[in-house]
Image (cartoon, grey):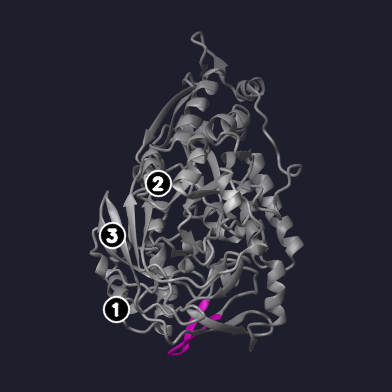
Amino acid sequence: MKDNISAFFKALFLIIFLFIPFYLIAPSDTEKEKGKVVKVNPESFSVEIGKEGGVLKRALGGDAKTFNPVMAQETTSTAVIGVLFNGLTKTNLKTLLPEPDLAEKWERNKEGTVWRFYLRKDAKWFDGKPVTADDVVFTYNEIYYNPDIPSSVKDMLYIERKKFKVRKIDKYTVEFVIPKPFAPFLQAVGQPILPKHILKKYVDNKTFTSTWGINTPPEQLIGTGPYRLVEYVIGQYAVYERNPYYWEKDRIGQKIPYIPKIKAQIIGDPDVRLIKFLSGEIDYYGVRPSDLPEVLPKAKEKDFTVYNLGATPSTLFVVFNQNPKAPIPKYKLKWFRNKKFRQAISYATDRMGIINIAYNGLAYPIYTAVTPANRRLFDENYYPKYPFNLKKAKELLLEIGFKEGKDGFLYDSEGHKLQFTLITNSGNKERETIGNILKDDLKRIGIDVNFQSIDFNNLVSRLMSNYDWEAVIIGLTGSMDPYFGQNVWLSSGHLHMWYPNQKKPSTKWEAEIDRLFQKAAVELDPEKRDLLYKKAFKIIGEEQPMIFIAAPEELLAVKNKLKNVFPTVWGWYKSEYVYISE
């Protein structure tokens, strides 16, 4: 074994998929007075000593579907429970490199196939019991690798379809043996570690998937994170208090987090969230481009700063259901599984019109799952493009057998009218605007779209549980490394949106994407690795299983009383060090 600061680890700096977004800090008073969106050089940011006290007031976009981090598949859940848990490692959001979390250090063999993690001896669960190697082994071997427990995490913890071998060395040491060295291993083991003494019985009696539902009393949720949930009222609010056992302190010995209490109102309507922010009831707000004319003029009076975090890795797209198990007509499945049908819809998507109308011009058109935030993979000339062209779209539809009826709508060879139901989540103005634009443009080429907006949690249930949907406008958060998107891109992936959980690839192109992702996982040469991923995303661009529309810029308004603020598109850097200065 070698020390973790080894040649291998230094090489990892170059191997990790680095796409650096704008990093922003609080500007000078002069800049604040300009009432403009602020971008600042990250080199000028450093964490300062803060002071304890106050209550952070924030908003949550919706109720959690579950408090179980393994079962959570949507941001409404992860936003509620994210601060409750830790992994062995975490990612430094300034450098995008892995750093210690529950593991205070690690070492590995020369080949990079055997890793030992040494746990913090001062890490404790919310109930005061120590975090040990037994918890780590239990989490991986009995939960993440359990065939009876579906989890998106599981897709990230295989190399060439082989598991990591995880075993206890002593009370505070865990060993991982992996089939081959691969670049993102230290990030892969950042998954939440769970308490064996609490959850073992639920795994054994096969009720784990329903454990820690949203009706679970908060005191029964046992984690290690900087905050614990102490109160949760469905549809109203969540209250957090600082974990008294949290190990981290600042350099003069003060407890971290500096802010001992968080109160988060559950507000599904972004318009209401904006009103609450401007009235001072919440301390920061994710600004929509359409909000800027109202928000910017009030920045000085209300004492806040609007930050532009730059291009996000998040993507927005339309996806058609290609799942043979879905309760939709077989003739529609035939349409949706036809590449030229999907390409026609892509040509009929007015991306620039959508960006100007829905995003106030603050977004980027995309045609595959790569945004300008993905610096190493983004290449405007490499991936196929589908510029807005209704004539081309209709030609493709006629080419695959659709014919125009007397009513102006298209019909397939069996006489079925070309119509489908397109859904999105209610309360999201951008997506609702996009849905209406698509409906109108598709009607111009003979497609009848029934556009509906529904509750987000209902939407997720349709997508991931009963598959009762035809087409949807939805988005995905990006990942720092494409490897961590395997739950979407592998044909076996739980979030393989158009046809999840395939036992074997249903098409040759999906099989090729599987191959490229699996090969990239063990490729340590960064240029070769990037090329493998680019080839995979080029196939996705050609096949259009997801019709990508736009990658918005991310805007954030923050009250100036919050100090040590360093937001990024990946989250807040050292958020535990944020403090309140009234």
The crowd level at tag 1 (other Cα within 10 Å; few <14, some 14-19, many 20+) is: some
Is 383 situated above or below 228?
above
Mark 2 → mark 3, Cα distance in angstroms:
30 Å
Residue 403 image point, x, y percent: 56, 16
Report the disc number at residue 277: 2
**Residue beneath the point at 47% across and 20% down:** 417
- The residue identified by callout 3 is 213
Residue with the most extreme top position: 406
Q: Is residue 266 left or right of residue 538?
A: left
Which amino acid type corresponds to the residue marked 3 in the rendered image? Gly
Mark 1 → mark 2, Cα distance in angstroms:
35 Å
Residue with the most extreme bottom position: 170
Report the disc number at residue 552: none
Residue 582 image point, x, y percent: 41, 60
- SS at mark 3? loop
**Residue beneath the point at 60% across and 75% down:** 179
**Earlier along the polypeptide chain: callout 1 or callout 2?**
1
Callouts 1 and 2 close, C-beta under 8 Å: no
Callouts 2 and 3 close, C-beta under 8 Å: no
**Residue beneath the point at 42% across and 32% down:** 329
Callouts 3 and 1 close, C-beta under 8 Å: no
Q: Nearer the viewer, residue 409 or 503?
A: 409
Which amino acid type corresponds to the residue marked 1 in the rendered image? Asp
Mark 3 → mark 1, Cα distance in angstroms:
19 Å
**Earlier along the polypeptide chain: callout 2 or callout 3?**
3
Report the disc number at residue 127: 1
Start-end of magenta stretch: 165-176
Q: Nearer the viewer, residue 128 or 28?
A: 28
Q: Main secondary structure of the magenta part?
A: strand
Q: Is residue 185 left or right of residue 228?
A: right
Which amino acid type corresponds to the residue marked 2 in the rendered image? Phe
**Does residue 116 appear anywhere in the picture?**
no
